[in-house]
Image (spheres, helix red, strand yellow):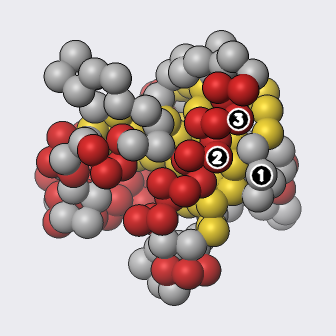
Amino acid sequence: MEKLDLTKHFKSYYTAKSKPELQYIEKARYLSIQGKGDPSGEEFMQKIQALYPVAYALKFAFKAKNRDFVVAKLEGLWWYDESRFTGVSIADSPTTIPRSEWEYRLLIRIPDYVTENDVESAVAATFATKGLPAVGEVSFFEMTEGKVAQMLHTGPFDTEVKTLEKLGAFMSERGLSKNGLHHEIYLSDFRKTAPEKLKTILREPIK
């Protein structure tokens, strides 16, 4: 039985160049969990630890139906209250906005044949076996980003500012404006990869 590998099946979704570029992102389905606060904190890790068991519960449920798939890369949508922090550029936001004020939605992309009912069943099964309170916060999520500007960032998260400056300049030169939430796709497992080797797609929906 051949596994569906989403990173290969949707290669353009999981690929970016080391210079700014335009891309179009199709409609996709995800497992999702929301939170707020410092991504280096304990609560953030608890959200990740709730998301993955549900992803594997889904995987094994579909493997039993001969529709196995590889659990995809972790992703995140990031935002803050723009009514409180006005006029902050894309590049300045990581250093200007206190980490305690960052809100996020962690994502793992799932195959298009996985339904909301499938996700709810996997959440219930995972909560019954794991008993982690945050598991109950995992839900089905669907998103169409459409036109985006993006760039591959290589290195630690705290140097993303330099990449975001290039991305922001690219958008300004073309008269493009923000049209959605800042999106990051973690191509590397940041729990196991040296900071200087981390690869992250930085993506901004635009209009």
Q: Is residue 6 left or right of 92 when viewed as pictured?
A: right
Going from the N terminus, do you reach mark 3 or mark 1 first? 1
Going from the N terminus, do you reach mark 1 or mark 2 first? 1
Residue holding disc 2:
166
> Is label 1 in a helix, a strand or a loop?
loop
Q: Residue at x 31, y 51 (%)?
A: 95
| Residue 146 percent coordinates (x, y) | 70, 21
154, above or below 11, in the image: below
Of the pair 34 and 59, the residue shown nearer to us: 34
Residue 152 placement: quadrant: bottom right
**Disc on res. 19:** 1
Amino acid at dot 1: Lys
Residue 182 shows in the view: yes
Alpha carbon distance from label 1 to label 2: 8 Å
Q: Residue at x 23, y 27 (%)?
A: 85
| Residue 97 percent coordinates (x, y) | 25, 42
Quick one: label 3, few (<14), some, or many (20+) residues within 10 Å? Answer: some
Of the pair 48 and 68, the residue shown nearer to us: 48
| Residue 7 percent coordinates (x, y) | 75, 55
Are discs 1 and 2 less than 8 Å apart at CB? yes
Residue holding disc 3:
170
Quick one: label 1, few (<14), some, or many (20+) residues within 10 Å? Answer: few
